[in-house]
Image (cartoon, coloured by chain):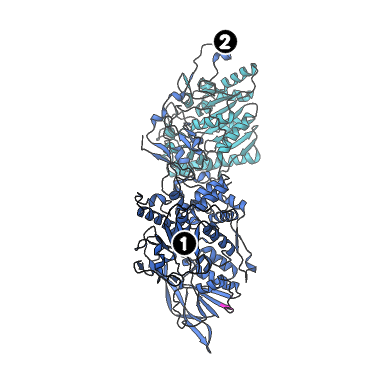
Chain colours: A blue, B cyan
Amino acid sequence: MSDHDVTRPKEIGRNIPPIAISETSTLVNPTGSWKYIMPRYEDRVAPCNAGCPVGIDIEGYMYLISQGRVKEAANLLVRENPMPAVTGRVCHHPCEHSCNRASLDEPVAIHSVERRLGDMILAAPPIPAPERTRRETVAVVGSGPAGLACAHFLARLGYGVTVFEAAPEAGGMLRLGIPEYRLPRAILDRQIERIAGAGIEIRTSTRIGVDIPWSDLDVFDAVFVAPGAHTGKDSRIAGAEGNEAVRPGLEFLKEVNAGARPDLGSRVIVVGGGNTAMDCARSALRLGADVTVLYRRTPREMPAIPLEVREARDEGVGFEFLAAPMAVVMEDGRFTGITCQRMELGEPDESGRRRPVPIEGDVFFAPADTVLTAIGEDCDLSFLPESVRTKWGLIEVDPVGESTSTPVFAGGDAVDMPRSVADALGAGKRAAIGIDHYLREKAGEAVGELPLGALRFGDGNVSAVRYLEDGDPIPREAPVNEVVTWDRMNPHHFHLAPRHEDHFHDATDLRAAFGETNFGLSEKEAIEEAERCLNCGVCNRCELCLIFCPDMAISRREDGGFEIDMRYCKGCGLCAAECPRGAVTMTREGI
Amino acid sequence: MSQTIIKQHIPREELLASGHLACPGCAAPIAMNLVLKALGPETMVVLPACCWSIIAGPWPQSSLRVPLFHTAFETGAAVASGIKAGLASRGDTKTTVISWAGDGGTFDIGLQALSGAAERNEDIIYFCYDNEAYMNTGIQRSSATPWGAWTTTTPTRDPEHHPKKDIMAIMAAHRIPYAATASVAYPVDLVEKVKKARTIRGTRFIHILAPCPPGWKTQNDETIELARMAVERRVFPLMEVENGGTWRFTVDHPGGSIEEYIRKQARFKHLTDDQVGLIQEQVDARWEILSNRVLHGT
């Protein structure tokens, strides 16, 4: 209906008395001139994206799922993370810790959604290998998550990539350190197959410095070093040296993960509170032992993923907190256990955790057949040339992983960063971008400074999609690289909805079973879970701005976005105040 | 679905034009827009004197894309009744005729005409958008002004000392087929009520609370927040009354202290904490009465 199409008196009847009739609309009034402040659509960054060490556009793929575009969501995910079926299972999901939804009810179960998408990707036919567009080649040392991620993104950037792996099979710590019940080998194999299938050569059983010299890598234009941390730290248990009953936990895990089922006896003590300790404890449990974890602080300070701790407890692992191992006890030449020092928490140390201090004279005996130590691992960097500088046993690198010796880059557990699969993947991605930039510059391309800040999600990790592809795959309005906090959101438009929890194997029949314990969510549940995402900071076309605008100044654009007609917007700010996700900003700029 | 997908419930047709003369952040055009969306183009609007007489635009303009009839303050319900009768005499039974009045034109000046129309059960929908004072003439108190509020005729040294008139009870007492309260902060509830009213014959009455930034002395962008708080804190419960006897709440009213609602509005700035406590008591007492009506009828 046009704005002039109001019923005229002649259409009503001829005999009505004279009366004033309006013939124009109020559209002639430029009421927008009243404003002193105006709204602008500005999409921001969801905290999950910034909190993801890999640099995944989580909010983006959640949005696509909510629109029924599940395949596109999976595609967006795998473009940022080459192994979602792995991380969906083993990542400690810091994304969920930063999820704004926690302030409303519970965080979105991002890992469960990722896992479901990851499994979908593995079930679908592989995408064709990227084209080789660059003449340069890059060597990658180590085929763990950092090495594979770096190789994957370098291949997508068009480089020839060769990965050198010391072990007989690729996967690094994913294969050697993570037990099957958390990461089934079939999933890992298929995931690595996918990555390797996309134009990457992996040379297994090739340890640099042993099987081939470092100098063999000179033929490559750049090297990415990600050897991992494989040497168990000294347990400092008196009398442990040379005693077969006291073993490095990682060595035990490697054995079990390779298929062996060593006899540990009936009582096992695991020393440590991290993920390796949990993996050791739960693996030993599956070999039929009674397992007690000995940790010198309290549950609150444990570095292990809380879910892993809970699962261990549910499966029957015992915990002895505030206790540190002291000395091996032998009786008649036979190992019978260890003496332990009772601890208490003192002042916080550099890590912010309260330092455990011994309680003088409070010592107890813990009987055991085997003690597994899992108190951290060191790196063997002896294969590196001296020009690659190290500090405290770790390779020194810049933000994109470049070492002090160009063109050697490094990442993963061998550099100073959190030791997680996600952080390793993120380091591999950053290094691939750093190597690409370096090689292009070397080839004489006018590359300028690497826009690292713009590539990051907020202050989080870099986005490969932003670096490799033109523009954002999901159109974002005037994006501002700033994380949206809960106080910028309007919670009134959200409904409470319980989080979908993963389905778990019944803990009672776990012993001696190395099958997967966590079954994740069904596809339907995962989609429902994705719909819990609040799309923090990003317009998801909810149209509340349009509904609440008193001046009808907002209209739909053909591309799905919105337009504000500044001729009529009076600058009241209701669109910004009511936007549930903080995607509208009021500004005085341009008035 | 964990998020409100409001847009699926709101018709897309726009029957209100930009360039109207409401103040920034005014709830009245939001209310009109939602009501017209729910009623559709086969609607005629009768407008007794109120803010909307200005908002609609000066002659020769109109901000509505449906016919609009400006009329005198006290005549909203009578003129709407007449137009409806005129249409009926010409064989038009489809067009919905509404009266769109402020609280002054409803609670005070237009009450006689409204009562007459309701008593005769005229086939009109009477909307009252209630900003709780005579706002466009300069914020004079009406019988819809809440206890304790400042207006230019109830200055802070002698603020409004009568509670708001219980217009819903008055309309229910006329035994009209449908009466409801609605809020711009609950657009789906509002649209559903208007659609429902449209299917009913006889006099229908819908009372919409319309926060007013200049009259309530609030920020322009707080309008929806205040309308929402009024509902949540039970100051303005959302309900329906059918045939004067069946009372029903239509949304959740979690309750809680009204302090924040009151303190956001500078028209209540002069109130002491004790006085705010008195308002809380009034709200609680009225909630009791309404809950009883919902449970036991009138």
Q: Nearer the viewer, residue A15 or B212?
A: A15
- The tag on residue A162 is 1
Q: Is residue A249 left or right of residue A587?
A: right
x and y percentages locating residue A390 in the rendered image? 36, 67
Q: Position of residue A105 (x, y in %)?
A: 53, 52
Q: Secondary structure at mark 2?
A: loop
Q: Quadrant of residue B204?
A: top right
- Name above or below for residue B277 compared with residue A314: above
Whether residue A499 is visible = no
Tell me which segment is drawn in magenta. Answer: A260-267
The Cα atoms of the two marked residues, 1 and 2, are separated by 91 Å
In the picture, the quarter occupied by the N terminus of chain A is top right
Q: Assign a secondary structure to mark 1.
A: strand
Q: Chain of mark 1?
A: A
Percent coordinates x, y for residue B105 in the rendering: 51, 25
> Of the residues tagged 1 and 2, which is closer to the observer?
1
Q: Which residue is mark 2?
A: A14
**Location of the C terminus of chain A (image quadrant):** top left
Rendered view: B146 above or below A349? above
Residue A312, compared with residue B75, is above or below; it is below
Q: Residues within 10 Å of mark 1 (few under 14, many from 20)?
A: many
Q: Chain of mark 2?
A: A
- Evaluate whether residue A153 shows in this view: yes
Residue extending furthest bottom?
A332
Principal SS element in the magenta part? Answer: loop
Asked whether the residues under the numbered discs 1 and 2 touch, taking CB atoms below 8 Å apart as contact, a structural biologist would say no
Q: Which residue is at the front of the view, B148 or B16?
A: B16
Residue type beneath disc 2? Arg
